[in-house]
Image (tube, helix red, strand yellow):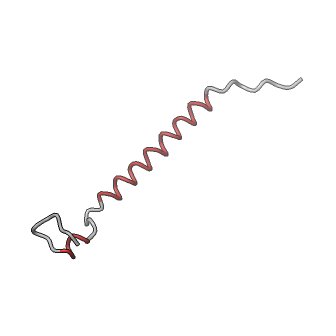
Amino acid sequence: METYDPDKNTTEVRQANPRKMNLRVLVVSLIGIVVLFAIVYLVLSMMQPAPTPAS
């Protein structure tokens, strides 16, 4: 395995990120997308005209 950091060996290079920054980015992005879709849904549902009674 090729290492790009001269101070680390191959085992250290393969280790996961202990701060889990990738997970944080994915979770925050997912929450942002869910909130965005909820806002769009609420805006579109509030713009619908009131139903007229059937005669």
Residue 53 quadrant: top right
Question: What is the number of callouts on the image?
Answer: 0
Image position of 1 with respect to 20: above or below:
below
Residue 14 quadrant: bottom left
Which residue occupies 57% across, 35% down? 42
Which residue occupies 26% across, 62% down? 19
Farthest residue in the front direction? 2
Image position of 52 with respect to 38: above or below:
above
Farthest residue in the left direction? 7
Farthest residue in the bottom direction? 11
Q: Residue 12 location in percent, x, y? A: 20, 73
Is the N terminus in the top left, top right, bottom left or bottom right quadrant? bottom left
Q: Residue 16 location in percent, x, y? A: 28, 68
**Foreground of the two, 46 or 13:** 13
Image check: 23 left or right of 42? left
Image check: 46 left or right of 6? right
Which residue occupies 44% across, 48% down? 31
Q: Residue 21 location in percent, x, y? A: 29, 57
Which residue occupies 15% across, 74% down? 9
**Foreground of the two, 3 or 54:** 3
